[in-house]
Image (cartoon, rainbow, N blue to C red):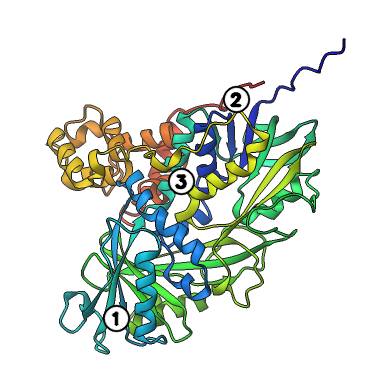
Amino acid sequence: MSQSPPPVRHDVDLLIVGGGINGAGIARDAAGRGLSVALVEQDDLASHTSSASTKLIHGGLRYLEYGEFRLVREALIERERLWRMAPHIIWPLRFVLPQTNAPRPAWLVRLGLFIYDHLGGRKALPATRTVSLDRDPLGAGLKPGKAKAFVYSDCWVEDSRLVVLNARDAADRGAAVMTHTRLVEARRQGQGWIATIADAAGTRTISARGIVNAAGPWVADVIGRASEAARDKGAPRDKGAARDGGVRLVKGSHIVVPRLYEGDHAFLLQNPDRRVVFAIPYQGRFTLVGTTDLPWEGAPGRATIDEGEIAYLCETATRYFTRPTTPADIVWTYSGIRPLYDDQAANASAVTRDYVLDLDGGEDRAPLLSIFGGKITTYRKLAEHALRQLAPFFPQAGPAWTAGAVLPGGDMPDADFDAWLAGLAGRHPGLPETLLRRLARAYGTASEALLGTARTVDDLGRHFGADLYAREIDYLVEREWASSAEDILFRRSKLGLHVPAGAAAAVDAYLAGRPAATGRPALSIVS
């Protein structure tokens, strides 16, 4: 009597390529369903698109103009859900939408805001209201003009921290997260994949039952590295079929300038070309202005702002605010390349922000799932959809679970950040309130583990300027994969605009002198 061959053993169920928000979110979801996961990221977590956003959890009011009702509804539903999951890094933000210089009639804007208020089941955020800017403090700092404005609500997010917290939760659930590790090539073998990956120590192979391509701007490049990934034209696709080369790269840039107005509210500014630009309070002392939308024709990589974008954003701010904005005022800029699904829209601003999941695989072909497009607000739903697409290949996977699960540090009673911060201050009376507030905003309840038994700042080790101490650096290396001053100052602590000159070099020197956090992550063997 013949026997069936023994099952092939693979290092992991899923190999995920890309450590942005989509890759980290899928890794977390999959690990929580009991799948073994390895995530590789060629640079640092959130080092490209996911840290170059406008840092909003929002439905995308302007997408209503393009008929993107499904996307807006999904994002609006996710908005309050994500706020509850991570109340330390996500919080409400009021937006003032002046009708000054407005290319759209007030009735049309109000209609859009009515839909925005009711499309996604808003519960905790306040509804839209109308104000007269000549009588309301919200108009302070604006040039005189038409006094009418609408005030609506969305949420702010510390975008790169959202990525890190998803990766941290994935790792706590068993995933191997490998930064500064790139995919060299992958080929199908039997019912799985054999992938070659490379880091500073050299190359090695890893076998996986399936691959998720969440490489963002490099999504087409990763498809090219998977030598057996010729498209099966009959394979099922989710939300449409992404053609070969179906990614459209769009650059978005932001500027940061000294604070243009008082208050903790943001502005949504309408331009004569019908594009909108945000002006948002940033790091207490600054205003963040963005974004642009420009086609990116070059190879994926680190983008930088150009003179035309600087002029556009400065002109927009100057059109609205009494204080002129010039290139000389800019204290920092950042740019990112958005890997959007190419829907053949005529201009970059109109390209859909919806996502497309492209599955190459079948009964005798191990899966390669490629992610096109998406926005940070919908990353959790995207991950659920990705696992739904992969379900036939992983019948052992558990059900969806992330909708009600808080992220690390978010387990505050009633999601009440202020009450939890008051308790933290009471437990550490010898530490400055400004330091405790920043740590609570960055790490939530994990601040207790970071602080340990510290009673005064002297217990936190070497001081690097602002309120950055060695204790926090050690925590970021050991728990959050930080390995450079840029990782720490601009993606983990957000202190890059506050530390004195020379702090980055001092942090890098300190990192070079301390022992490495870990070696290569161990990969569990599954059958």
Q: Which residue is drawn at 56% across and 47% down?
A: 385
Q: Do the residues labelled 3 and 1 touch (CB within 8 Å)?
A: no
Q: Residue at x 15, y 42 (%)?
A: 422
Determine which quarter of the picture holds residue 346.
bottom right
Is 468 or 45 nearer to us in this picture? 45
Is 124 or 252 nearer to us in this picture? 124
Q: Nearer the viewer, mark 1 or mark 2?
A: 2
**Image side of residue 207 versus residue 315, left or right:** right
Is 338 or 85 nearer to us in this picture? 85
Q: Is residue 189 visible?
A: yes
Find residue 242 and report its horizontal and vertical position in percent. 69, 58
> Disc 1 marks which residue?
321
> Disc 3 marks which residue?
163
What is the three-letter code of the residue carrying label 1?
Phe
Q: How crowded is mark 3: few (under 14 residues within 10 Å), some or many (20 or more)?
A: many
N-term-proximal mark, 1 vs 2:
1
Q: In this view, does 98 lie above or below 120?
A: below
Q: Residues within 10 Å of mark 1 (few under 14, many from 20)?
A: some
What is the three-letter code of the residue carrying label 3?
Val
Alpha carbons under labels 1 and 2: distance apart: 55 Å
Question: Which of the labelled discs sits on residue 523, or is there none?
Answer: 2
Question: Which of the labelled discs sits on residue 527, or is there none?
Answer: none
Alpha carbons under labels 3 and 1: distance apart: 33 Å
N-term-proximal mark, 3 vs 1:
3
Q: Quadrant of the C terminus?
A: top right
Alpha carbons under labels 2 and 3: distance apart: 22 Å
